[in-house]
Amino acid sequence: MIALNEFDHTGMAAEIRRNSRKISPKDLHEKVDALPPKVFGEYTLSLCGLSIEDM
């Protein structure tokens, strides 16, 4: 999931899994690096993993 704040050009990229042990920060970082820079290049994204425990 990606949430963007267009006012200050920040955002959050999250990997969401039911089982928190399946969240891979490395995989999420690779996915964010693969985002098209033309669209997401001006945003500073923070990364996080969310699971059922976060609900």
Image (tube, rainbow, N blue to C red):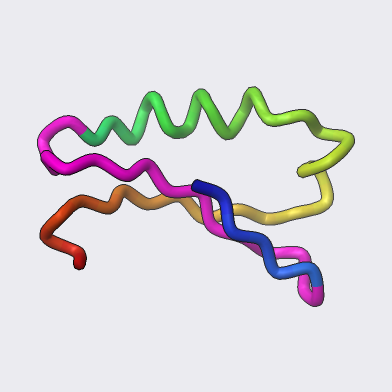
Q: Residue at x 15, y 55 (%)?
A: 52
**In the rendered image, which quarter is residue 22 located in?**
top left
Screen quadrant of the C terminus: bottom left
Examine the image and state in which quarter residue 23 appears.
top left
Rendered location of residue 47, percent (x, y) = 45, 50
Mark count: 0
Q: Residue at x 11, y 35 (%)?
A: 21
- Locate residue 51, reporting x and y percent: 20, 51
Q: Residue at image x 83%, y 51%?
A: 42
Per the image, is 3 magenta?
no
Which residue range is magenta in the image? Answer: 7-22
15 sits to left or right of 37: left
In the depicted structure, whether residue 34 falls above or below residue 38: above
Residue at the right extreme, as displayed = 38
Name which residue lies at 11% across and 39% down.
19
Residue located farthest toward the bottom when viewing the structure as drawn: 7
Q: Nearer the viewer, residue 19 or 31?
A: 19
Q: Is residue 53 left or right of residue 24?
A: left
**Quadrant in the picture for residue 11:** bottom right
Q: Is residue 30 left or right of residue 24?
A: right
The answer to which of 8 and 15 lies nearer the viewer is 15
Picture layout, residue 12 above or below residue 30: below
Q: Is residue 12 left or right of residue 28?
A: right
Task: Give percent across and percent down for residue 7.
Answer: 81, 76
Is 13 part of what is drawn in magenta? yes
Q: Position of residue 12 (x, y in %)?
A: 54, 57
